[in-house]
């Protein structure tokens, strides 16, 4: 029977080696704007030739959690964000996402946004879970002062420093508020993650302070 155990171990090692060398483009498909390179264990995905998301497998964390774990980095075009990710089935958990970026990244991730901003961003998300009805987030995103405008507009508006604070309540529902720095009670936008949906909308104060956003609203599944 010992030879069967050795054969099973040999087969498992072969399958792991085979999977680890599979090109990322055969395992991941994020659409035509993303170009994949490398392997599932150590690879990268490039968005529009400007932003590179790279990952490197973390074997010890993977074994401890019985899940795929990796260190991740998003860089390029004024962006440098690092953190870690753990994947089990369709569940993605990001931890310690921190770094800097700018408004151009928002436009690249969602070209349909009804505004464009020239502002610096500081990202500090201690946790981000994408898992349908169990999705949640905790952290902050800070925007420096700058100018924003609707696409194609002839003029832009000056925007003060802003902070988006994201917290999870006792019922695991995630709440977020956008406010000027130092004026936490003046909510310009409010949002939530609940039952697998992300919702964000402007407050009356937000529509007055950020006219270039129009009647901006997000209501979509995660």
Image: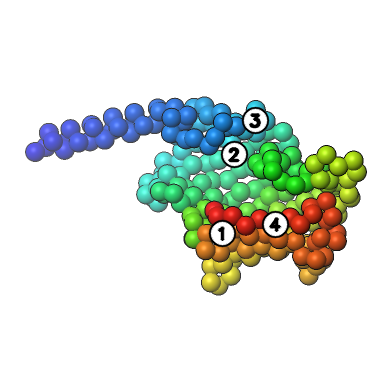
Q: Is residue 15 left or right of residue 156?
A: left
Q: Can you identify the residue that label 2 sits on?
A: 73
Query: Is disc 3 surrounded by few (<14), some (14 to 19) or many (20+) residues within 10 Å?
Result: few
Pick the quarter of the image with the N terminus.
top left
Whole-angstrom CA distance, mark 4 to mark 1, is 13 Å
Can residue 101 be seen?
Answer: no
Q: Can you identify the residue that label 1 sits on?
A: 197
Determine which of the numbered discs, if any, sits on residue 48 in the image: 3
Whole-angstrom CA distance, mark 4 to mark 2, is 29 Å
Whole-angstrom CA distance, mark 2 to mark 3, is 16 Å
Question: Depth-wise, is mark 3 or mark 1 nearer the camera?
Answer: 1
Tag 2's secondary structure? strand
Q: Horizontal and vertical percent for residue 188? A: 78, 62
Q: Can you identify the residue that label 4 sits on?
A: 217
Q: Return the disc, 2 or 3, that comes first in the chain's sequence.
A: 3
Query: Is disc 2 surrounded by few (<14), some (14 to 19) or many (20+) residues within 10 Å?
Result: many
Q: Return the disc, 1 or 2, that comes first in the chain's sequence.
A: 2
Look at 40% across and 28% down and name the residue there: 22
Q: 91 or 195: which is nearer to us?
A: 195
Question: Depth-wise, is mark 4 or mark 2 nearer the camera?
Answer: 4
């Amino acid at each position: 029977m010992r030879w069967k155990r050795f054969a099973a171990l040999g087969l498992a090692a072969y399958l792991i080696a085979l999977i680890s060398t599979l090109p990322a483009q055969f395992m991941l498909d994020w659409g035509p704007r993303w170009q994949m390179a490398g392997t599932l264990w150590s690879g990268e995905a490039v968005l529009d030739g400007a932003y590179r998301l790279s990952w490197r497998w973390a074997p010890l964390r993977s074994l401890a959690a019985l899940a795929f774990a990796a260190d991740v980095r998003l860089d390029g075009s004024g962006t440098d964000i690092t953190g870690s990710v753990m994947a089990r089935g369709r569940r993605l958990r990001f931890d310690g996402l921190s770094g800097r970026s700018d408004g151009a990244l928002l436009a690249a991730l969602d070209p349909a946004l009804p505004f464009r901003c020239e502002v610096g961003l500081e990202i500090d998300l201690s946790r981000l879970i994408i898992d349908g009805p169990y999705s949640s987030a905790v952290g902050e995103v800070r925007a420096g002062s700058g100018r924003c405008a609707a696409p194609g507009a002839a003029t832009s508006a000056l925007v003060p420093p802003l902070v988006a604070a994201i917290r999870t309540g006792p019922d695991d529902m995630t709440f977020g508020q956008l406010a000027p720095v130092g004026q936490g009670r003046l909510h310009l936008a409010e949002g939530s993650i609940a039952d697998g949906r992300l919702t964000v909308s402007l407050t009356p104060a937000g529509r007055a302070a950020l006219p270039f956003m129009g009647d901006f609203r997000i209501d979509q599944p995660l």
